[in-house]
Amino acid sequence: MRICVIGTGYVGLVAAACFAKMGHDVVGVDADERKMRLLRDGISPIHEPGLDELLTRHLGARLAFASALDDQLSADLVFLAVGTREAADGSTDLRDLRRAAVEVAKRLPDGAVVVNKSTAPVGTGEALRALVAANRPPDARFHMAVNPEFLRQGFAVEDFLRPARIVIGAEDEPAAQALSDLYRPLARPIHLTDMRSAELIKYAANAFLAVKISFINSIADLCERTGADVEHVAEAVGADPRIGHGCLRPGLGFGGSCPPKDTVSLLHQARRAGCDAPVVAAARAVNAERPRLMLRRLERLVGGIAGRRIALFGLAFKGGTDDIRESRGMELARMLSDAGAHLRAYDPAATPRARATMPELVCSESPYQAAGRAEAAVIAADWDEFKQLDLRRLRAVMARPLVIDGCNLWALDEAARAGLEYHSVGRQAVSGDERAQSRRPQPTPPLDEAWQAALAPRGA
């Protein structure tokens, strides 16, 4: 098939490269000329494992990039994959999407399918259809569909080529057939539905994942207070097939480009429809508190932030990407800086983006350099590099071997053997004079008076 992808951000660029790998002729279009120059040279503007290899292999063969649409667009399928930002009132800013639809409409071949891959509120597909029709000759035929993405940054290529499911919301049979034919070689489950349902599926999925993350973080807080271990709790709870293990890892909360803005948009859509989504609102409230809880814990452990030398590992919103949107690490960096800390940060990929956003941030070339003479180190992203750190070397370079791990990257006994004072999420703290967590006395869960009376020795 001949495919045109409008927008070369995370979604559009991965889609274009993967469609080319699937054997289709693809053109990616983006008005950002700097990005286009990089892509024409085979250089990805984003950090995404596997993407550079796809660009190198298919560029100039099945894959091309342009900064503007041809006057005579030659495509069977046109994917709209432009950004949809959060507006000030919580609604979704669709200006770029509408602009792209108008430009496509003026050049769309007869009978082509326009596919919205951008995340947009329920009803957007129908609105786009009307917009395209208004900018086409009255007798020109085209078809409309919605095809949401479910890509995890850091695993986007893998997720595109081996998705858990493919959702196609089509207005008619030709659109449904064209997209089904496109994705059938992937041999993955295809869910055919109407456009409005497809749009809501995207929001519902991201909101549910956000709820799971906030839920396990609340349980982690309870574990710390009662002496339970959240890792054991999450493992057993996730073993229930009705629940599953996905997104049951405690930490600093969700970030990135999708869950934060998508949950806001879902709440806005619910209000406009005259209903509430209190579970989603609660998940956002729990998430907003996570960085502040980390800051208060650090302040308590080091005896105040001002003047303290602090190392921060992780500026991307998670490991495997250079995306700093809604990053917990960046939020912590700003909080620590505002509190007067002498901060040194390290991230394997996100440093250039972080410096562009926060020029005063001091970044190091390695985690050990960042931790040099530090009184505490905070881990804010789950990079594999951090999992594999030499903990004894880390201890040796620090002024005080205090680590607060917001991602639970290390086993408790491993941190203790290395001589670290190690605090994680939902687990009991260990210090270097211990050889195993089991030797550390566990706090006694609080009991109400009735239980205390029942458990008291007889005759007391």
Image (cartoon, helix red, strand yellow):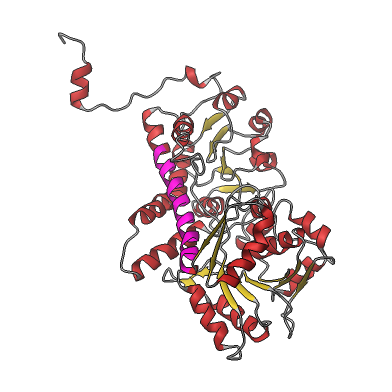
Up the image or down, 300 lies above or below 50; here it is above
Q: Provide residue 258's location: percent of width, then percent of height.
A: 53, 59
Which segment did they paint magenta?
Answer: 196-219
> Is-magenta flag for residue 211?
yes
The residue sitting at 74% across, 56% down in the picture is: 51
Up the image or down, 277 lies above or below 372; here it is below
Q: Main secondary structure of the magenta part?
A: helix
In this view of the protein, which residue sits in the foreground, 214 or 206? Answer: 206
Residue 45 seen in the current view:
no
In this view of the protein, which residue sits in the foreground, 237 or 105? Answer: 105
Quarter containing the N terminus? bottom right
The residue sitting at 37% across, 56% down in the picture is: 281
Q: Provide residue 448's location: percent of width, then percent of height.
A: 22, 28
Up the image or down, 20 lies above or below 282; here it is below
Answer with left or right where residue 50 lies relative to residue 341: right
In this view of the protein, which residue sits in the foreground, 447 or 69? Answer: 69
Q: Provide residue 424's location: percent of width, then percent of height.
A: 50, 35
